[in-house]
Amino acid sequence: MKAISFGKSQNLIGILREPDGSKSEVIAILWNTGICTRIGPNRFNVEIAEALANQGIASFRFDLGQLGDSLNQSDEVKFIERNQNDLKAAFDQLEAEYGYQKFLLIGICSSAIDAFHAAVRDTRVQGLVMVDTFAYATPRFKRSYVSERLFKTMSWKRLMSRKAKEWTGEWEKTRAEAEAGDNFEGEWPEQVDAEKGLGELIDRKIPMFVAYTGGFQHVYGYETQFLEMFPNLEFNDTLSLSFHPKADHLFTLLEDRQLFLDSLRKWTKQNFANISTANTPQRRSLQDVLREIESFEAARVALEFHAKSMTYGELTSQARNLAGYLQSQTEENESLIGLCLDRSFELISSILGILKAGKTYLPLDPHYPSERLETMIQIARCKTVLCHRRHADIYRNLGLKVFIWEDIASELAVKTFPLNAVHSEIHSPAYVIFTSGSTGTPKGVVLGHGALTELLDWHKERYPAEHPKTVQFTPISFDVSFQEILSCLHLGGTLTLIEEELRLDPIALLELMIEAKTERIFLPFVALQFLSEAAVTLKL
């Protein structure tokens, strides 16, 4: 990715993202306007660009003049014309400097209106995506709109309030003030002009993807309304229409957003099949990550604890042998293994071994009250537990199959257990984590191989430290523990284990970090505050 300045006075700022190893014929253009500039954390355009990159499609996303990082140097007063000038500047820059001559415009709400106008004006536009764009009332929409509000007291109150303002002349003043202020919906074209423009796009055989959300239910109420708005047009195969009545305007809920992105991917694949997808990453599972960890130099130090160390060779060998043991001692349908080990080398090798065996681990913190552990086991329907001997009685009393580490370790030291090949799907469960239960009964959440592998791959790309030294701070009952353990080992780093008591002593923890030459630690804000205060105390 690279930042680009462009425009009349180099006043516009954008981000160009090109696929590695291939050149796409079409580049997608996204820009911020309307409500999208006010809801930064959603990063919707960023996620769309990432989805396109995985299909081998380049993208360019930028801020319009006077929004975000861009400055307004245009003398144009009209909102639509100013935006069109900025879009044309983007087209011209991408063509002149990077050779792109075909553009796919993706607009949401206000930017959907911009995209429509630009597509009609500029023949370099080869595809159009509009989300919550212009909408016009149809007979069916009017009937539904009235019937839904006919017996609602609030609807009548709003109507009477509006009529009262019309009688007093206040309504025109209110409308004028609204039009002079923010206008998130942009300037919709007249319906006849929208029909004419769509007709021109159909004649040019421009593929169009049009989506509406529940956030537009005040103007768009059913899936086929778009078709009924333009009864004189024959879209044939140029239009893909998508309706998401449960989604909000920016697909804030991840489930809704994923459905939209899946629909968009399908549409781009159908309409831009000639685009290179050679660099599309394959969906991987944690089995792939574990094989990468096994490939590291055997003599490299993987774990440190109490002045002792365990190499990658020793760690992966123990994990593989444990995996073979678990396969030999459990049925195939015994997929969930409760894990109740104190901080130790075997805790880390057991996490790897359970995953290597194709099983799922359930962290059971030995410091939890027995009642909470029992509740978690019942909810998760766990039948098997791997624990240290001192914790075994808790689980034997629950009628579970209990593997005691001290006994297993003796067997693993003298016998090699064959490991059957495992193929984990991206949706295969890796571990089950429980919420704190502060608002009631703890709830279990299942984390799958695909999501966790993508997290580790992202971490490796975003923070590419070479053999990082990381402190294993988080208890395994919190899901950050997976990230700090596996992201360290995935990079061939050294994981420093600490006693539970040391976690609660910021001065001692800081001294250990200095001694161990720690480069990374994952901390909640409160712990970071304590650690900072300890640094002040030690005058570091």
Image (cartoon, rainbow, N blue to C red):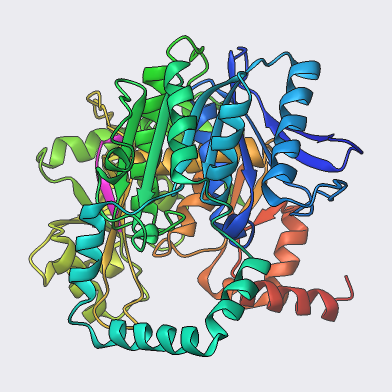
How many marks the image carries: the answer is 0
Residue at the image position 61 percent from the left and 56 percent from the top: 34
| Residue 464 horizontal/vertical position (percent) | 68, 37
Please identify the quarter of the rendering in which residue 81 is found.
Answer: top right
Residue 537: image location, x then y, percent: 83, 81
In which image quadrant can residue 253 be found? bottom left
Name the spot of residue 277 as percent of width and height, x first. 48, 15
Q: Is residue 353 visible?
A: no
In the image shown, does 93 or 205 lie closer to the viewer? 205
From what the image shows, is residue 438 above or below residue 233? below
Residue 426 vs residue 136, the one in the foreground = 136
- Judge by depth and name the residue closer to the eye, 14 or 389: 14
Most extreme residue toward the top is 274
When the figure is inspected, residue 532 is found, relative to residue 407, above or below; the finding is below
Horizontally, residue 308 falls left or right of residue 149, namely right
Residue 359 among magenta residues: yes
Vertical placement of 498 versus 439: above or below? above
Q: Quadrant of the N terminus?
A: top right
| Residue 323 relative to residue 395: left or right | right
In the rendered image, the quadrant that contains the C terminus is bottom right
Placement of 478 over or under 368, stated as above or below: above
Question: Magenta span covers which residues?
Answer: 356-362
Instruction: Give how far across and how far down residue 324 sits, in percent.
Output: 25, 33
Point 86% across, 47% down: residue:
75
Residue 445: in magenta span: no
